[in-house]
Image (cartoon, rainbow, N blue to C red):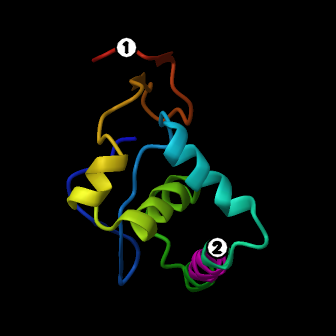
């Protein structure tokens, strides 16, 4: 999972940690991600309610700045569990490394090449 080095105002007025949507999970991070589907996990369900509410508010107010929602949900969940990407606990579980490389033609919404360094 690759997190840019700085936080961004993806949702105006709120600091988030956007990341690229491609990531490699280990057993521990996969277990944590699956928690989001567990309706009995109150921590996960409260997180999903909060982030869905944030998305709705910012869509309605026109303050959605950039990035796709799927590029926030997973990363913010790991931040919720492990702390800031710069923290030792986060680094213990998440390797901040580019997992795929993509090349886009100008103006095109989808990449023309995957997994090649530029």
Is 14 in front, or is 99? 99
Please say if 77 is above or below 21. below
Magenta-colored span: 46-56
Judge from the rendering whether residue 12 lies leftward or rightward of residue 24; answer left or right. left
In magenta stretch: residue 48? yes
The percent position of residue 92, horizontal first and vertical second, equals 29, 49
**Residue drawn where x is 30% and y is 35% of the image:** 97
Disc 2 element: helix
- Mark 1: few/some/many CA within 10 Å (<14, 14-19, 20+): few
Please say if 7 is above or below 91. below
In magenta stretch: residue 54? yes
Is 107 in front, or is 9? 9
Q: Which residue is mark 2?
A: 48
Check whether the beta carbons of the residues at disc 2 and disc 1 lie within 8 A of each other.
Answer: no
Judge from the rendering whether residue 53 lies leftward or rightward of residue 38; answer left or right. left
Q: Which residue is mark 1?
A: 116
Judge from the rendering whether residue 39 lies leftward or rightward of residue 112; answer left or right. right
Quarter of the image with the N terminus in it: top left
Disc 1 element: loop
Q: CA distance from mark 2 to mark 1?
A: 34 Å
| Residue 23 visible in rendering | yes
- Mark 2: few/some/many CA within 10 Å (<14, 14-19, 20+): some
| Residue 3 visible in rendering | no
């Amino acid at each position: 999972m690759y997190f840019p080095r700085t936080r961004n105002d993806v949702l105006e007025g709120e600091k988030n940690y956007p990341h690229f949507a491609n990531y490699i999970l280990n057993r521990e991070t996969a277990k944590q991600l699956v928690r989001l589907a567990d309706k009995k996990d109150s921590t996960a369900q409260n997180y999903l309610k909060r982030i869905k509410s944030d998305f709705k508010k910012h869509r309605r107010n026109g303050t959605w700045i950039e990035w796709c929602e799927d590029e926030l949900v997973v990363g913010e969940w790991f931040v919720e569990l492990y702390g800031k990407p710069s923290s030792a606990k986060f680094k213990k579980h998440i390797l901040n490394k580019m997992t795929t490389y993509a090349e886009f033609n100008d103006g095109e919404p989808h990449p023309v090449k995957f997994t090649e360094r530029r």
